Image: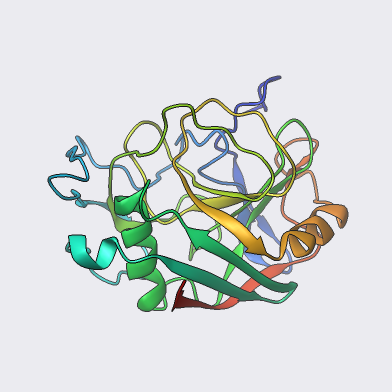
Amino acid sequence: MTTPPSTTPRKARHVKRKHWALVAAATVLPLVASTGTAIADTPAVATPATGCAYTPAVPADNFKGIPVFDAKKAAKPYRATLRTSQGQISFEALTDKAPCTTFSFRFLAEHDYFDRSHCHRLTTQRIYVLQCGDPTGTGSGGPGYSFPDENLTGATYPAGTVAMANAGPNTNGSQFFFVWKDTKLSPAYTPFGRITGGLDVLQKIAAGGEDDQNNPGDGFPNLPVNIRNVKISAR
């Protein structure tokens, strides 16, 4: 699959690499699923006012269960801090704008879902993102459930945005991406966080380049980004 000559992310082919087992680009970017992303047949749609629907889906990699939405907990602001092999990255969760998404991220982080995983995709042309959140490192992994999009009206993706990767409308799972440089994307990827520390870390990773294994400017980061753990703290 070739990268479209546009700013829309895509699902890239995954391949085996000598030193990193299965690594490759993923679901996001464009975030269309061509090879098995966590997609429910018909994901239920729910609004924040009535609660969030988390629908069982495959695959279920490193399965931690399916969240049960708690509106009171979901409303509490928090900061997520990712300790990685390249440095620390922190972001403020937009709990007021994307409660279903931020509740899911908190659930996965608190169950150590992201620990010892790595960020498998870096793009350095047209769109400028680092994609993470797949425990298999292949770009097609997921947590065993999916949930609807949020916060898309007027969505933009300046540097410092944290947003969900997906495989089409309402197919969010565990994969997400950091925007390290202002990028133009269609408003199809739920923005759910704002980086408060570590943008310089992302820019260092980007400066290291990627291996073009998917297409020019699209591949595995040359500076491997291993997520050691994710800490959730009150904001």
Image spot of residue 206 (x, y percent): 80, 53
Q: Considering only vertical position in the picture, is 190 above or below 225?
A: above
Q: Considering only vertical position in the picture, is 87 above or below 176?
A: below
Left or right of residue 107: residue 196:
right
Q: Quadrant of the N terminus?
A: top right
Tell me, yes or no, if residue 61 can be seen here: yes
Residue 72, by quadrant, is bottom left
- Give the farthest residue toward the left: 50
Residue drawn 49% across and 69% down?
Answer: 79
Left or right of residue 89: residue 163:
left
Tell me, what colour scheme is on the image?
rainbow
- Give the farthest residue toward the right: 207
Residue 229, by quadrant, is bottom right
Residue drawn 55% across and 37% down?
Answer: 11
Image spot of residue 235 (x, y percent): 47, 71
Please tell me which residue lies in front, 221 or 153: 153
Left or right of residue 184: residue 32:
left
Image spot of residue 91 (x, y percent): 56, 63
Q: Considering only vertical position in the picture, is 92 above or below 26?
A: below
Residue drawn 73% across and 69% down?
Answer: 19
Image spot of residue 181 (x, y percent): 75, 43
Tell me, yes or no, if residue 60 can be seen here: no
Please tell me which residue lies in front, 188 or 221: 188
Left or right of residue 37: residue 178:
right
Residue drawn 63% across and 57% down?
Answer: 120
Label tally: 0
Residue 20, by quadrant, is bottom right
Please tell me which residue lies in front, 229 or 234: 234
Please tell me which residue lies in front, 142 or 100: 100
